[in-house]
Amino acid sequence: MRTSRPSRSSLLPSLLLLGAGAGLALPAVTTLAMSGATAQDAGLASGLVNTTQQVGAAFGLAVLASLASGRTDRALAAGAARAEALVDGYQVAFGAGMGLVAAAIVVAVVVLRRGPE
């Protein structure tokens, strides 16, 4: 298993994709969430959207970090080198994250209705 330090060129495409995706998705989600709010409820709705995003991100990170930590601990207990165990743990976390993104795409495709025709 390769455990050498990744180069900037190997990380840049993923980071650019993440930035572009978040930059396109978050304003659209915020606009959608605020579209039904009245003028009196705009502050409450905005706060709820922001809080939900923050709590969701913190919860997701906690779950993925727990998966990575558990897998790393098991690999270390099995005698793997520290760097190799970390890579193994991170692979599990990234795989779980990819699975969650794939599930979210399926839900979005199935649940979201078409606009007026």
Image (cartoon, rainbow, N blue to C red):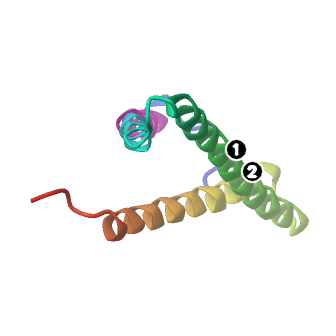
User: Does the magenta portion include 32?
Assistant: no
Rendered position, 42 above or below 48: above
Q: Residue at x 43, y 36 (%)?
A: 38
Of the pair 83 and 107, the residue shown nearer to us: 107
Quarter of the figure that contains the C terminus: bottom left
Question: Is the Cβ of the residue at disc 2 closer than 8 Å to that at disc 1?
Answer: yes
Q: Residues within 10 Å of mark 1 (few under 14, many from 20)?
A: few
For disc 1, the marked residue is 58
Q: Residue at x 65, y 62 (%)?
A: 92
Res. 1 visible in picture: no
User: Does the magenta portion include 19?
Assistant: yes
Observer-side mark, 2 or 1, equals 1
Q: Residue at x 37, y 40 (%)?
A: 35
| Residue 51 % position (x, y) | 64, 38
Q: What amino acid does circle 1 point to? A: Ala
Residue that protrudes farthest toward the front in the picture: 40
Question: Magenta-highlighted stretch: main secondary structure?
Answer: helix
For disc 2, the marked residue is 62
Q: Secondary structure at mark 1?
A: helix
| Residue 107 % position (x, y) | 41, 67
- Mark number for residue 76? none
Q: What amino acid does circle 2 point to? A: Ala
Q: Residues within 10 Å of mark 2 (few under 14, many from 20)?
A: few
Residues rendered magenta in the picture: 10-24
